[in-house]
């Protein structure tokens, strides 16, 4: 069965059993910024499990693309490790339970998928008698093929606390393995006999910080089966993902480009790395990630560079990774339409990054050569672990390559320190892949309070900023409490609240809650479950008690500033669509008191003139002082009216539509001005790119805009006073000042050059002699690369036969210049020396064999670089004597 058939059979089986098919979520989740990537099939559904969002159905089925970075270094070492794969999953949100879950897994595997039931075994948790009985009594799997294992094997938890539960895994039994001594084993061992194909997780507990397992009121089912693992078995290539139809076209393209065969042995590791990483990178780019040196972009860059490094080992030319990306697009676009839409960007990004890596790879060799030269000059016997790790982490140099090159020069590598740094990085990667468990428990806690005790909040904040209410619930440190005393950080639920809970890009309200006996300052407001609003703050006076009458009051100044920015965001969105076109759509926003931030889809940078038009249109709408209205209506009616909405947001059957004047209509639950004139003024303060095809505008309104204008006026007046001109003549005065500075700098440079001959003569007098050749190595003090080049050329021309290496510092940058007389070429090269020593000062360089320059920002290491250069030249002449 091919992979398309596997997907279709999986969807069909569960749709017949009442499941609703959802498309794969992106690899970057909007609802969970705590993780780098979607790393599990259930992760996009966490808001449904926690009650923060209403699920479209209680039974859901998906094929979810996932990416995990913790095993990136294992890819290629065997035939099954991957960073990117597809996870088949069926889910129950408070609906069916263990019996249906396990029986359906068995029916699908032994029915449509055609697995041999006699070769399947199962595992259950040692405490899970219910699952054991289902396997042995309902499914009738022989007891000797159901293994009861402990927490390490059969208890699923994404962290030390949070939603968790026992699981039951299904394995293929391949029988005793060649080369493994006969013994009694179970699936928890790693002898190669058992291959996991499906996991059924039973979310039935909330693990507390003290280790207690609190049963959940609503239990959930979360299952996962790797598509690639299923394909291995059904396509007759167990243990080798790269021979399935999910990878075969990519591997074949590598074989064609490299002239090698997969399976011959020597090239297999590199073939697997190139194929897997190019596929993973293609999907990341398809979801809008761009290579960078931070966070998600860094992971993408590392994948591409590791693939490019192994592509070079296979003899592939630059541009090959881009070709493999296009093969991935053709192979997967039927299932993931975003790949087809991003085809050109995928190819261009891969090609550009691969060509950058060609330069970086050369720089990495320069860094290693510089480190070896510095080690020899300092009398050290090896390369330190920090340098080895930097070469690996930044330049993609495997430790094996560093060890080999350093060893050929008679140097060791501190691999202990290298492994320490590598493990620290892996620990950070594992930590970033954990679910947001605090958020999950937060939602589950208040969902239970709502369902068990009727704790619900009525929001009154559209029409008022204060209200009388009753305290329904108090909680601290994840536990319900009856009272909260002074100094306690507390979560408060009122039956009526004017506090707006964070949502739709608008931050939660702040303010205070008072009773006859106490007072709390509210620092944030959240809605962890539908119909429940939680004010989070600190008791600053007295005591708060559950059941007590209370008065809640929102910080009016902050709320009004936030309202101005929120309504301003709507007007900005409408103006962008009018000026730039209807291809503009909202991609995110942040609305709070200081300013607003609006992300939108657009393929290029708007011109300054376009931004001025947008700003003018927004302020024209503000001056019109049109009323702002909000209406609740059926979702379909709202969409039919042309209301703007977020395409990846899931809305209820009824929605709130906000109209701000005749041109702005959006689905929005936030708080807004009563009229556009309340905004006062909107000023765009910044515009830039935040990702492929995503632009960001930052702006201020109201008092923030007034403060911006005043600050600009004060700076202008202060500059005019310093230059002693009227403010209207300030641009002309600044231009004249710049011209004067340029003229003075030229005169100063001319003076410096006039004394250069004298300086050169003085430096030549300081030359040391090596076997008849003169060597000048000097730190000349304040100088930039251009000055040093001119001076080194003059010194070189006076040496007769020799090498000159000069260093200097200008501002926060160190510079180097090297000159070599013609008679020493090609044995000694100025270009080669600079490329070896410039990395010591944190930079790079190059030039011609007779004259080269370099620079960097680590000015404190300039002396070390000069010593390394002296050592390189001495080693050359010492070696020449030794070989003669």
Image (spheres, rainbow, N blue to C red):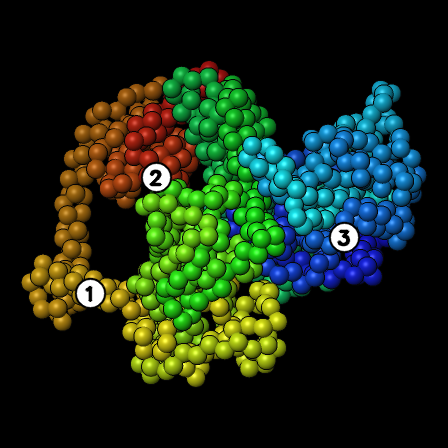
Q: Tell me: residue 821, above or below residue 436.
A: above
Residue shown at the point (34%, 52%) measured from the top left: 516
Q: Is residue 31 above or below residue 570?
A: above
Q: Secondary structure at mark 2?
A: strand
Q: Identify the secondary structure beneath mark 1.
A: helix
Q: Is residue 222 visible?
A: yes
Q: Which residue is mark 2?
A: 856
Question: Badge 2, how many Cα within 10 Å: few under 14, some, many 20+?
Answer: many
Marks 2 and 3, how far apart at CA: 63 Å
Q: How many marks?
A: 3
Pick whichever of labels 2 and 3 is earlier in the sequence: 3
For disc 1, the marked residue is: 710
Residue reaching furthest to the left = 724
* Residues at circles 2 and 3 in contact by the CB criterion of under 8 Å: no
Q: Viewed as shown, does residue 838 lie left or right of 415?
A: left
The residue identified by callout 3 is 96
Mark 3 Cα shell of 10 Å, populated few (<14), some (14-19), many (≥20): some
Q: Nearer the viewer, mark 3 or mark 1?
A: 3
711 with respect to 20 (left or right): left
């Amino acid at each position: 069965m091919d992979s398309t058939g596997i997907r279709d059979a999986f969807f069909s089986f569960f749709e017949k059993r009442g499941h609703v098919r959802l498309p794969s979520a992106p690899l970057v989740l909007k609802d969970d910024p705590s993780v780098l990537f979607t790393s599990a099939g259930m992760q996009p559904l966490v808001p449904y499990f926690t009650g923060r969002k209403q699920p479209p159905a209680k039974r859901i089925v998906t094929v979810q693309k996932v990416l995990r970075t913790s095993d990136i270094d294992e890819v290629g070492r065997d035939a099954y490790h991957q960073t990117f794969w597809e996870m088949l999953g069926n889910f129950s949100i408070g609906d069916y339970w263990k019996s249906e879950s396990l029986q359906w897994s068995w029916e699908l595997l032994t029915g449509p998928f055609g697995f041999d039931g006699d070769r399947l075994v199962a595992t259950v948790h040692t405490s899970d008698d219910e699952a054991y009985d289902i396997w042995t009594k309902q499914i009738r799997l022989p007891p000797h093929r159901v293994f009861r294992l402990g927490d390490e094997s059969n208890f699923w938890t994404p962290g030390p606390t949070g939603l968790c539960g026992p699981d039951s895994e299904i394995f293929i039994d391949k029988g005793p393995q060649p080369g493994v001594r006969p013994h009694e084993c179970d699936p928890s061992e790693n002898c190669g006999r058992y291959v996991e194909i499906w996991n059924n997780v039973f979310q039935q507990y909330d693990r507390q910080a003290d280790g207690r397992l609190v049963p959940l009121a609503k239990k959930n089912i979360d299952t996962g089966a790797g598509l690639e693992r299923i394909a291995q078995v059904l396509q007759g290539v167990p243990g080798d993902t790269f021979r399935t139809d999910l990878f075969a076209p990519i591997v074949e393209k590598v074989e064609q480009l490299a002239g090698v065969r997969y399976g011959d042995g020597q090239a297999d590791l590199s073939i697997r790395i190139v194929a897997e990483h190019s596929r993973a990178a293609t999907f990341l780019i398809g979801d809008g990630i761009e290579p960078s040196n931070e966070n998600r972009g860094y992971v993408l860059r590392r994948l591409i560079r590791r693939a490019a490094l192994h592509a070079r080992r296979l003899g592939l030319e630059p541009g090959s990774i881009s070709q493999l990306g296009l093969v991935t697009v053709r192979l997967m676009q039927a299932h993931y339409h975003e790949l087809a839409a991003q085809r050109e960007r995928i190819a261009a990004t891969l090609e550009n990054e691969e060509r950058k890596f060609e330069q970086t790879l050369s720089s990495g060799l320069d860094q290693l050569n510089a480190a070896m030269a510095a080690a020899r000059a300092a009398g050290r016997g090896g390369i330190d672990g920090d340098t080895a790790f930097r070469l690996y982490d930044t330049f993609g140099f495997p430790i094996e390559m560093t060890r080999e090159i350093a060893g050929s020069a008679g140097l060791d590598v501190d691999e202990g320190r290298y492994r320490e740094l590598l493990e620290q990085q892996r620990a950070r990667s594992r930590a970033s892949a954990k679910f947001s468990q605090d958020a999950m428990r937060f939602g589950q806690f208040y969902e239970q309070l709502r369902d068990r005790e009727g704790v619900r909040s009525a929001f009154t904040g559209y029409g008022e900023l204060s209200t009388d209410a009753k305290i329904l619930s108090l909680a601290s440190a994840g536990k319900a409490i009856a009272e909260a005393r002074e100094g306690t950080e507390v979560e408060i639920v009122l039956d009526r609240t004017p506090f707006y809970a964070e949502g739709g890009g608008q931050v939660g309200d702040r303010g205070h809650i008072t009773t006859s006996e106490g007072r709390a300052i509210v620092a944030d407001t959240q809605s962890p479950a539908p119909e429940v609003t939680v004010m989070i703050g600190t008791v600053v006076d007295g005591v708060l008690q559950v059941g007590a009458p209370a008065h809640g009051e929102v910080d009016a100044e902050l709320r009004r500033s936030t309202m101005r920015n929120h309504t301003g965001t709507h007007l900005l969105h409408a103006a962008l669509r009018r000026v730039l076109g209807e291809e503009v759509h909202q991609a995110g926003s942040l609305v709070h008191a200081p300013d607003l931030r609006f992300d939108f889809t657009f393929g290029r940078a708007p011109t300054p003139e376009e931004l001025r038009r947008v700003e003018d249109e927004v302020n024209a709408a503000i001056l019109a002082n049109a009323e702002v209205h909000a209406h609740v209506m059926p979702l379909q009616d709202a969409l039919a009216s042309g209301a703007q909405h977020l395409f990846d947001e899931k809305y209820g059957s009824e929605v709130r539509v906000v109209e701000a004047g005749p041109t702005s209509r959006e689905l929005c639950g936030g708080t807004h001005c009563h009229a556009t004139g309340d905004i006062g003024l909107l000023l765009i303060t910044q515009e830039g790119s935040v990702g492929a095809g995503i632009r960001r505008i930052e702006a201020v309104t109201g008092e923030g805009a007034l403060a911006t204008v005043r600050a600009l006026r004060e700076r202008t007046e202060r500059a005019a006073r310093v230059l002693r001109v009227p403010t209207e003549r300030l641009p002309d005065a600044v231009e004249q000042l710049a011209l004067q500075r340029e003229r003075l700098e030229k005169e100063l440079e001319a003076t410096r050059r006039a004394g250069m001959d004298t300086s050169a003569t003085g430096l030549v007098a300081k030359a040391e002699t090596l076997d008849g050749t003169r060597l000048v190595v000097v730190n000349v003090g304040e100088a930039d690369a251009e000055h040093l080049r001119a001076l080194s050329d003059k010194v070189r021309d006076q040496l007769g036969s020799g090498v000159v290496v000069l260093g200097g510092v200008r501002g926060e940058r160190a510079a180097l210049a090297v000159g070599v007389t013609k008679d020493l070429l090609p044995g000694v090269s100025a270009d080669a020396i600079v490329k070896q020593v410039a990395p010591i000062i944190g930079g790079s360089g190059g030039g011609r064999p007779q004259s080269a320059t370099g620079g960097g920002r680590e000015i404190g290491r300039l002396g070390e670089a000069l010593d390394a250069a002296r050592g390189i030249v001495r080693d050359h002449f010492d070696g020449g004597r030794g070989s003669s």
